Image (cartoon, helix red, strand yellow):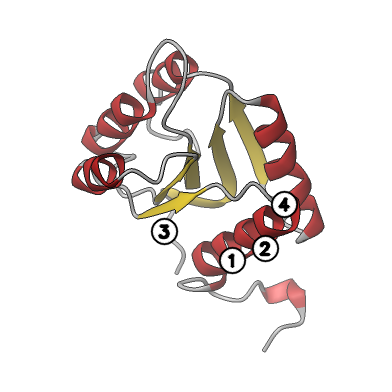
């Protein structure tokens, strides 16, 4: 039985860079990922969503989080998410332009499930989003009854 808390059909994309947001959305479309994607353009928008979340609201099945965000940075967003009594189990994939060891270690210390350095190349970015979605949505999930999969 599927947990009623978890919505595999919702992705939170927390990204201030318009080009990177567009790339991510295009990559999801390219890989036929039909999940609802809620976009947050800065860290404070994401914090409001976390802090106003109520039982009964959909829990995102995945959070894609940039670290270098205006107003409130990604580390603070990650800390709040992982301390939330209902959202802490949500997988968080950090998508950052920073490959610095300190940033990577801090993200994992705060509970990130995965840390990926954004590739500059569009095709590589497409492929990376495909791999992320296959990993987080392809595993640990019952096949949909109406998809025709065994």
**Real-space CA distance between mark 3 and mark 2, rounded to the nearest whole angstrom:** 29 Å
Instruction: From the top left corner, tell me how far across and down residue 88 is, in percent.
Output: 29, 43
SS class, disc 4: helix
Report whether 132 appears left or right of 84.
Answer: right
- The answer to whether marks 2 and 1 mark residues whose Cβ atoms lie closer than 8 Å is yes
Which label's residue is closer to the chain start, 1 or 4?
4
Packing grade of label 3 (10 A; few <14, some 14-19, many >=20) is few
Counting residues from the N terminus, which is met first, the one under dot 3 or under dot 4? 3
Residue sitting at 51 percent across and 71 percent down? 141
Q: Which residue bears the numbered disc 1?
A: 131
Question: Pointer 3: what residue?
Answer: 3
Q: CA distance from mark 3 to mark 1?
A: 24 Å
At a point 58% along the width and 23% down the height, the residue shown is 16
Q: Quadrant of residue 145?
A: bottom right
Mark 3 or mark 1: whose residue is earlier in sequence: 3
Determine whether 8 is above or below 14 in the image: below
Q: Is residue 22 visible?
A: yes
Image quarter where the C terminus lies is bottom right
Which callout, 3 or 2, points to the residue nearer the camera?
2
74 in relation to 47, above or below: below
Viewer-side residue, 29 vs 106: 106
Helix, strand or loop for disc 1:
helix
Q: Nearer the viewer, residue 98 or 32?
A: 98
Foreground disc of the pair 2, 4: 2
Q: In the rendered structure, which disc, 2 or 4, sits on the residue that comes first in sequence? A: 4
Percent x, y of residue 74: 38, 29
Q: CA distance from mark 2 to mark 1?
A: 6 Å
Considering every residue shown, the one lying at the far top of the view is 71
Q: Residue tagged by mark 2?
A: 127
């Amino acid at each position: 039985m599927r947990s009623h808390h978890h919505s595999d059909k919702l992705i939170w994309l927390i990204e201030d860079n318009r080009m990177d947001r567009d790339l991510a959305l295009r990559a999801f479309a390219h890989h036929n990922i039909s999940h609802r994607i809620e976009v947050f353009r800065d860290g404070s928008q994401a914090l409001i969503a976390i802090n106003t979340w109520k039982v009964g609201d959909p829990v995102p099945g995945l959070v894609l989080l940039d670290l270098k965000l205006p107003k409130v940075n990604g580390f603070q967003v990650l800390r709040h998410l992982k301390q939330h009594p209902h959202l802490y189990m949500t997988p968080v994939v950090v998508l950052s332009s920073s490959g610095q060891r300190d940033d990577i270690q801090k993200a994992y210390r705060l509970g990130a499930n995965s840390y990926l350095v954004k590739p500059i190349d569009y095709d590589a970015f497409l492929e990376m989003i495909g791999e992320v979605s296959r990993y987080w949505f392809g595993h640990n999930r019952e096949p949909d009854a109406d998809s025709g999969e065994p």
